[in-house]
Amino acid sequence: MTHSSPRRTRYGAVAIGLHWLLAAALIGIFCVGLYMAGLPFSPMRLKLYNWHKWAGVTILALSVARLLWRLTHRPPALPVDIAQAMPRWQHVAHHGTHHLMYALFFIVPLVGWAYSSAAGFPIVLFGVLPLPSFVPVSPELAEAIKPWHRITAYALAGLVVLHVAAVVKHQLIDRDGLLWRMLPGRA
């Protein structure tokens, strides 16, 4: 299948770098979150919780950078032949999934920050820079917020799995070469 000009349909190096950096960070923080939640109270658990908070704030900053880049650099259009071959529901799913993922890139760490603040556990970024509390200390508020961090994290993980499944479908079933648009390296 022939495609539109690679120069016009491929993402730029910054967008590709932010995509893969955020992907690796999200997978890492999700796995650490699952692991640490099952640990008994210990120095290791406390260390992982602090690391998790630092990673969450870093992911929030990366998400801001990625959103600003996306708002100031229009993404390349889908190659015409691929766009025409996709049913309407796939276009809707593509855009909906991306919009929800972008929203959750912000919601998950902000809810985690709010929970940590409400529980009275301040975030001291890298053990050096104290961040302001997002909400006042309140055990009742902390209990109300706590499940939402887990729920939104699982929602984001589900969307990531859906996104990866769509990539696999395009690569192995459609064989349309869509994946190369976001791979590092030259076109």
Image (cartoon, grey):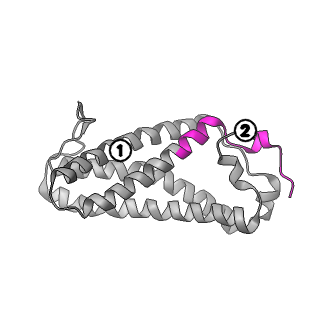
Q: Is residue 100 left or right of residue 153?
A: right
Q: Which amino acid type corresponds to the residue marked 1 in the rendered image?
A: Ala
Name the mark on residue 141.
none
Against 129, residue 90 (above or below) is: below
Report if residue 141 lies within the magenta region.
Answer: no
Secondary structure, magenta segment, majority class: helix
Whether residue 87 can be seen here: no
Which image quadrant: the C terminus? top right
* Residue 152 image position (x, y, % from top left): 38, 60
Residue 49 to residue 156: above or below: above
Question: Is 8 left or right of 51, judged from the image as shown?
Answer: right
Which of the two labelled residues, at mark 2 and mark 1, occupies the earlier sequence position?
Answer: 1
> Could you tell me residue 62's position as x and y percent?
45, 39
**Quadrant in which the N terminus appears:** bottom right
Residue at 17%, 62% in the rendered image: 40
Foreground pick, 46 / 13? 46
Q: Is residue 14 visible?
A: yes
Outermost residue toward the right? Answer: 2
Identify which amino acid the numbered label 2 is placed on.
Arg
Q: Residue at x 47, y 65 (%)?
A: 158
Residue 37 picture quarter: bottom left
Tell me what residue is drawn at x 75 percent, y 56 percent. 177
Residue 39 falls left or right of residue 59: left
Q: Nearer the viewer, residue 152 or 123?
A: 123
Between 167 and 149, the one nearer to me in the picture: 167
**In the rendering, which numbered label is found on residue 186?**
2
Magenta residues, as a range?
Answer: 1-20
Q: Secondary structure at mark 2?
A: loop
Residue on which the image places disc 1: 55
